[in-house]
Amino acid sequence: MITVALLQKEILPVLAPEDFFILLSHATGKEKTFLLAHPEYILDEKTHALAESFFARRRKHEPVAYIIGEKEFYGLSFQVNKETLIPRPETEILVENALALITSLKSTDIDIVDVGTGSGAIILSLAHALSEKKLPSHIKLYGSDISERALHVAKENQKRQQTKLPVQLLQGNLLEPYTLLKEKSKTLLVLANLPYLSHALYSSTIPDVQNYEPKSALIRENAGLAHSFELLSQLTALKDTEKIFCFFEISPEQTSSFVQHITETIPSLSYEVQTDLSGRDRFLFVSF
């Protein structure tokens, strides 16, 4: 007879308590609060076997989000799998910053593009937040990704979230699929949580990342900044756009290289470095 208490005694020495309870909750269909309050709860044989399979996968460093197939982001639940990165908590700040900017521009026609959208967590969270604010319908939202498999996940999340503001998902490299659709004289806001790890940084990541998350969505050349610099070039080419804003998510040690690139190649570009909750450089905001 296996109870929650017995499983805790067996598993907690090798798994973090938070991981244990998330996985056990998913296996049993019971809330974490229930499991904490009822250590005497008995698992049937089938449920116990499922829970043990989850624990075994986690001990091999498979991320919890991939095991249960979902991850919470910005208060919403998103489907994730090995075709997409797992949304990080710090990226929620990107949504907050974008929301603040959009609110300040509410009298302007705005196109918003999430490049490298992956699971769609950023653009769908933003669509949900904008719907709650009941802003005018002059806002158009897009998510682009070069990976067809990643876009499939984003489309499933689009069905799951059912946001009032529609999001058009496009396949292609960075802004290229959007530029085929855009109209002239629009204000454009781009959200760019692109692959930004250098090979050196990637080699220092934990096994959860190296063994399971898609390498193509993590690493880029030029110290991790190749995609960001390519996107900057695409933005610079949009001469018929009224105003352009872009939030780049970066790794803290990239700040000086990114700023140097801007000052050397686009000296007229306005930029601002923004930090995450721990005070580390995390975002670079640029405007044309």
Image (spheres, rainbow, N blue to C red):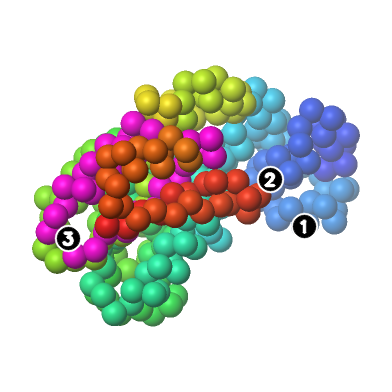
Residue at 58% across, 51% down: 276
How many angstroms separate mark 3 from mark 1 (CA)? Answer: 51 Å
How many angstroms separate mark 1 from mark 2 (CA)? Answer: 11 Å
Position above or below: 237 against 55: below
User: Which residue in the structure is indicated by mark 1?
Assistant: 33
Position above or below: 105 against 266: below
Q: Amino acid at mark 2?
A: Ile
Position above or below: 46 against 200: below
| In magenta stretch: residue 243 | yes
For residue 234, side relative to residue 67 (left or right): left
Nearest to N terminus: mark 3 or mark 2: 2
**Depth order, front residue of 77/190:** 190
Q: Position of residue 51 (x, y in %)?
A: 69, 35
- Tell us which disc is closer to us: 3 or 1: 3
Q: Amino acid at mark 1?
A: Thr
For residue 115, side relative to residue 181 (left or right): right
**Depth order, front residue of 34/110:** 110
Residue at 67% across, 41% down: 23
Q: Residue 261 falls in which quadrant of the image?
A: top left
Mark 2 residue element: helix
Mark 3 residue element: loop
**Can the viewer see residue 216?**
no
Task: Report the disc number at residue 22.
Answer: 2
Nearest to N terminus: mark 1 or mark 2: 2
Q: Position of residue 245 (x, y in %)?
A: 32, 58
* Range of residues picked out in magenta: 225-254
User: Which residue in the structure is indicated by mark 3?
Assistant: 241
For residue 210, side relative to residue 215 (left or right): right
Q: Are marks 3 and 2 in contact (CB under 8 Å)?
A: no
| In magenta stretch: residue 209 | no
